[in-house]
Image: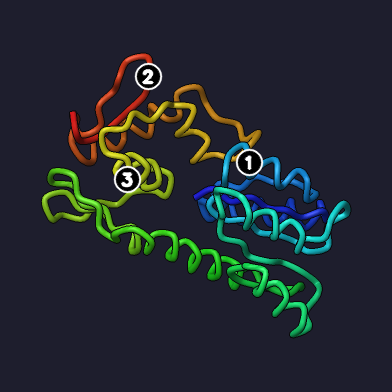
Amino acid sequence: MQILLVEDDLLLADGLQNALKREGFSVNHVSNGRQALQACRADAPAIVILDLGLPDMDGLEVLKHLRKGESKPLVLMLTARDTTSDKVAGLDRGADDYMAKPFEMPELLARLRALERRISAAHSSDISIGNVTLDTLTHRVTVDGREIELPRREFMLLKTLMENPGRIQSREGLEAKLYSWGEEISSNSIEVHIHHLRKKIAPDFIRTIRGVGYTVGKP
């Protein structure tokens, strides 16, 4: 799950990034509105955490541009403006949720998990290919009815592949979905995740297309 954090308070942004990464989220950070719009056009995130008090443009203006764009990520507003009128203005402009500063990290995580469930609910909850079933809401994966335990990144990698059966996913594209900008990634990180998934599911469930990437289903 790719998150874009738009926050000009660098100390707060650093703390949020570290906390979210510990929970398994892939988080990228920009500090102003123009960078946020450029980032969303280049590689649309699933969720944007948007501070309204940005140095170059009001967060509500950023929100307006996001809602006019093609990607339309879910937006959680994060702001010191905690009056009812401010909240109503943001929600009326198309925000999906609103949190006032200061806030508790467990609540932010709960809000993000709720948004994540909304994204999953937009599609069928269960994805089945062969004898493998993945539930996007409960994060359960079963093979022949037997549940297997997957770390978050292995789950997200498998989910990306199973949501696009027959479509080849490049290593670079998979890395972009699993890791944040600038995060240190070993040259074979995707290959290692694929290796672990094959051991837990079946050696031939994920196919390697040499020189191109990986795919499942629809040979």
**Residue drawn at the location 43% of the way across and 44% of the way down:** 153
- Where 167 falls versus 37 (above or below)? above
Residue that protrudes farthest toward the right in the picture: 55
| Residue toward you, 111 or 142 | 111
User: At 42% from the left edge and 30% from the top edge, which residue is drawn?
Assistant: 190
Q: Amino acid at mark 1?
A: Arg
Instruction: Please tell me the numbered disc located at residue 32.
Output: none
* 53 and 91: which is toward the camera: 91
Measured in 3D between alpha carbons, the distance from the residue under mark 3 to the one under mark 2, in whole angstroms, is: 18 Å
Residue to which mark 3 is pinned = 163
Q: Secondary structure at mark 2?
A: loop
The residue drawn where x is 33% and y is 32% is 194
User: How many angstroms separate mark 1 from mark 2 (CA)?
Assistant: 24 Å
Label 1: which residue?
Answer: 41
Q: Earlier in the sequence, mark 1 or mark 2?
A: 1
Residue 91, above or below 17: below
Check the image and tell me how it is coloured.
rainbow
Regarding mark 3 in the picture, which secondary structure is present there?
Answer: loop
Label 2 crowd bin: few (<14), some (14–19), many (20+), radius 10 Å: few
Which residue is outermost to the front?
68
Horizontal side of residue 10 vs 120, given as left or right:
right
Query: Residue at image x 29%, y 23%?
Result: 208
Q: Amino acid at mark 3?
A: Glu
In the rendering, at what x and y percent does residue 59 appear?
77, 61
In this orientation, which residue lies closer to the viewer: 83 or 183? 83
Q: Amino acid at mark 2?
A: Val
Name which of mark 3 and mark 2 comes first in the sequence.
Answer: 3
Nearer the observer: mark 3 or 1; the answer is 1
Residue where numbered disc 2 is placed: 212
x and y percentages locating residue 110 in the rendered image: 53, 70
Q: Secondary structure at mark 1?
A: helix
